[in-house]
Each structure stands twice: as C-alpha cells, then as structure tokens.
Amino acid sequence: GAVVSQHPSWVICKSGTSVKIECRSLDFQATTMFWYRQFPKQSLMLMATSNEGSKATYEQGVEKDKFLINHASLTLSTLTVTSAHPEDSSFYICSARGGGRQGPQETQYFGPGTRLLVL
Amino acid sequence: GQNIDQPTEMTATEGAIVQINCTYQTSGFNGLFWYQQHAGEAPTFLSYNVLDGLEEKGRFSSFLSRSKGYSYLLLKELQMKDSASYLCAVLDSNYQLIWGAGTKLIIKP
C-alpha cells in the first residue's frame, strides 16, 4: 500500500494565529516528505522538501520562518503556518516518498490535503 | 530551463477514447509520472514510465518516447468519473519532480 494521511482536513482560524498540519505515512516509511500549496484552478506549487532528521529545503520565495517544517520520524512531518494571514489561505498538500508499493521508489504518494481559511 | 507542456483542457464523450499528450525538456531524466487529481482533492498516482514504450494498466495506458521528450496518457472506455485533471511530472537528474500544469479533462454524456 501507500497511504498518507493529513490532519486536519479543514482549518478556519483568525489572522495572526499559528496552524499546525500533520502528515503521516501510514503503511510505509517515508525517507522524504514534500509540502505543496495549491490555489484554486492553479497547479501544484512545491513549498519545501524535508528528509527525516534534517532541515527542510525550501523553494525560492517560500519563507522558512513563516512555514516551519519538522520531519521528526520516518512517518511524520509537520507544517506550521506561523502568524497566518488571509493570503495564506490555500489548499496545503503533503506527499511522501520512499516505500509505497504501487510504483517505484521515487513515487510520491499524496495526503488528502488540508484546506486553510484565515479570516 | 525545465519545461513540461500539456494541453490546458480537453473534452471527450463518455465511452470514447482520449489521449493526453505531454512534452518535456528537463535537465536529465529519471522517469515520468502521470497523476490524476479530482477537483478539490489531492493527486493520486496513475503510472510511471522510465523506458520507451507503452505501459498498460486496465483502461489507462501510458506511453513514453525519451528521444522525443514525449509521453501520452490514453484513457479508454471513458466514464463520467474520469473527469479530472491529469498531471504529467518528470523526475530530473537530481531526482526532483518537475510538474506540468495539468490537463483538465471534461467528459460529456
């Protein structure tokens, strides 16, 4: 299998608060996890890549102090949106790579996504 | 630069066949993926090609020509539930996945 879960699936918060999103690979160990953001009717945008036990690599234009990523184990990565503002409202999706059986080792398996609405 | 091109939108009829093309120019090549993404949901893995030729998986097939930098996804016996976006993605020499913008497929009865 290759099941990736994300929690929560929906978040509504006030401007200025922080939001933590969890991503777990349920039936395989993920050496690498990815965080994406997707605005309506737009393509996936990679935010950062994280390897277990090391610091995440952020894509150009993504603020690492605003989007904190922790990859503490081979099955869990978290994304914390700090001091969220309305422009951070988006669909955040994680993916995990490293051991699912549906495709090769390089296949990314996606979580169901988290919709964030900042008021 | 790295570039992946696929049509923005296609329309097909239920029961018919549709071919979604993808051309790529990347720094190195370590395989090409096709993903399906229904509106409001995350992408799901469909297929992976690393060698030239056709890979068949039920109603879906994927073809690759590395010399032409070209792939297609073939969907047969279209069903209404196949209405979705189809994303082409290439694994480059650094094992980074380069994503196309996706092709929105509309199925009409």
Image: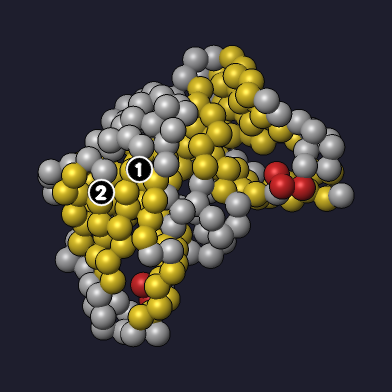
Seen from the viewer's position, the closer of residues A22 and B73 is A22
Where disc 1 sits, the SS reads loop
Mark number displayed over residue A76: 2
Q: Chain of mark 2?
A: A
Mark number displayed over residue A48: none
With B57 as the anchor, is A68 left or right in this view?
A: left
Toward the left, the furthest residue is A54
Q: Chain of mark 1?
A: A
Label 2 environment density (alpha carbons within 10 Å; few <14, some 14–19, many ≥20): many
A17 to A25, vertically: above or below:
below
Residue found at x 36% / y 37%: A27
Q: Tell me the amino acid under the disc marked 2.
A: Leu
Toward the top, the furthest residue is B52
With B75 as the anchor, is A46 left or right in this view?
A: left
Q: Quadrant of residue A60?
A: bottom left
Q: Tell me the amino acid under the disc marked 1.
A: Leu
Seen from the viewer's position, the closer of residues A111 and A57 is A111
With A36 as the anchor, is A80 left or right in this view?
A: left
Q: Position of residue B74 (x, y in %)?
A: 69, 30
Mark number displayed over residue A26: 1
Q: Position of residue A119 (x, y in %)?
A: 40, 85
Q: Position of residue B5 (x, y in %)?
A: 55, 40
Q: Position of residue A104 (x, y in %)?
A: 41, 24
In whole angstroms, how far apart are the C-alphas of marks 1 and 2?
Answer: 9 Å
Label 1 or label 2, whichever comes before in sequence order: 1
With B88 as the anchor, is A105 left or right in this view?
A: left
From this viewpoint, is residue A37 visible? Answer: no
